[in-house]
Amino acid sequence: MLHLRRPARLGEATALRHALGDWALARRLPADLIADLQLAGYEAMTNVVEHAYAAGSAGHLDLHAQHGIRAVRVTVTDRGRWRLQPDPAPGRGLPLIHLLADHSDVTPTPKGTVVAMSWQLPYQPS
């Protein structure tokens, strides 16, 4: 299991993307799955950086990853409140996450937002 908490800053999201890739590589996950995990996770983390905390306020993001027998699950959690950007055009982060993951949910709560993503693992006969 991987659990990391870092300040909600873009540079930290980039470092966490690499940490997630290293974690997945150590579990010998397929290269294409690792790429999807990293990109979807990074999109979720940059959403935290861009939307969860008011400008100038400090906040954190939590990255969790779990490797099970049949699936890999990654969650990105913040303790902020969703803030809309002044640009009225919708971003591409959430649609990309939904496209890359086999299953994904975005759950806003009074204490923050949780983005949960999961991928089925290929069948590996014994």
Image (cartoon, helix red, strand yellow):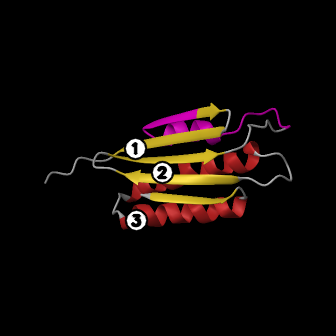
Residue found farthest to the front:
111
Is the Cβ of the residue at disc 2 closer than 8 Å to that at disc 1? yes
Q: Which residue is denoted by mark 1 in the rendering? A: 119
36 horizontally vs 59: left or right: left
Closer to the camera in the image, 26 or 58 = 58
The question of residue 49 being in magenta is answered with: no
Q: Dot 1, how many residues are within 10 Å of its Cα: few (below 14), some (14-19), or many (20+)?
A: some
Badge 2 marks a residue whose secondary structure is: helix
From which residue to which does the magenta span run?
86-106
Q: Which residue is denoted by mark 2 in the rendering? A: 36
Q: Which mark is residue 98?
A: none
Q: Position of residue 4 (x, y in %)?
A: 55, 60
73 horizontally vs 121: left or right: right
Of labels 2 and 3, earlier in sequence is 3
Q: Which mark is residue 25?
A: 3
> Quadrant of the image for the C terminus?
bottom left
Residue at 72% x, 51% y is 49
> What's under tag 2, amino acid-wise?
Asp
77 horizontally vs 50: left or right: left
Q: Dot 2, how many residues are within 10 Å of its Cα: few (below 14), some (14-19), or many (20+)?
A: some
Badge 3 marks a residue whose secondary structure is: helix
Of labels 3 and 1, earlier in sequence is 3
Badge 1 marks a residue whose secondary structure is: strand
Is the Cβ of the residue at disc 2 closer than 8 Å to that at disc 3? no
